[in-house]
Image (cartoon, rainbow, N blue to C red):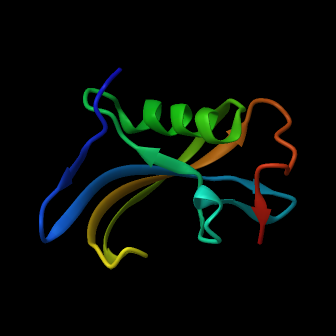
Amino acid sequence: MRESIKIKTDDYNFKFRVSGLIIKDNKLLLVDMDDSGFLCLPGGYVELGETTEVAVKRELLEEVGKKFDISEYLGVVENYFINKYSKKIHEISFYYLMTPIENIGTNNFTIV
């Protein structure tokens, strides 16, 4: 098992992430993060030695249970925010538009 790329310090937590945008019936599909009521795009940490393309496919398979192909690279965003635990976060996230290889249904998603 590889190590996720993240760093924790007293001041900040750093995350290197990927996210997949999945659009179904002109609606964006989101996941409820840890059943917390916080909605986010499906995705997760990039592992050391892994490309962002491989990481986004792996993360979507883990979170959704289905395989996806990358339709388009959308960009990279650098975020600074304070999370629900009042911890300062520095995040770099790559975003991809994804196409399902098989029918995904909507059981694991919130549609907005």
Q: Relative to residue 94, is residue 48 drawn left or right?
A: left
Residue sitting at x 87%, y 59%: 25
Pick the front one: 13 or 40: 13
- Which residue is at 55% across, 47% downward? 72
Q: Residue at x 69, y 53 (%)?
A: 22
In the rendered image, which quarter is residue 3 located in?
A: top left
| Residue 102 vertical position relative to residue 34 in the rendered view, above or below | above
Residue 46's x, y, as percent? 36, 40
**Quick one: which residue is furthest to the left in this view?**
10
Q: Is residue 32 above or below residue 47?
A: below
Quadrant in which the C terminus is drawn? bottom right
Rendering coords of residue 67 (x, y %): 68, 29
Quadrant in the picture for residue 5: top left
Q: Nearer the viewer, residue 100 or 64?
A: 64
Q: Is residue 107 above or below residue 101?
A: below
Residue 62 in the image, given as x and y percentages of width and height: 60, 34
Q: What residue is drawn where x is 28% and y is 73%?
A: 87
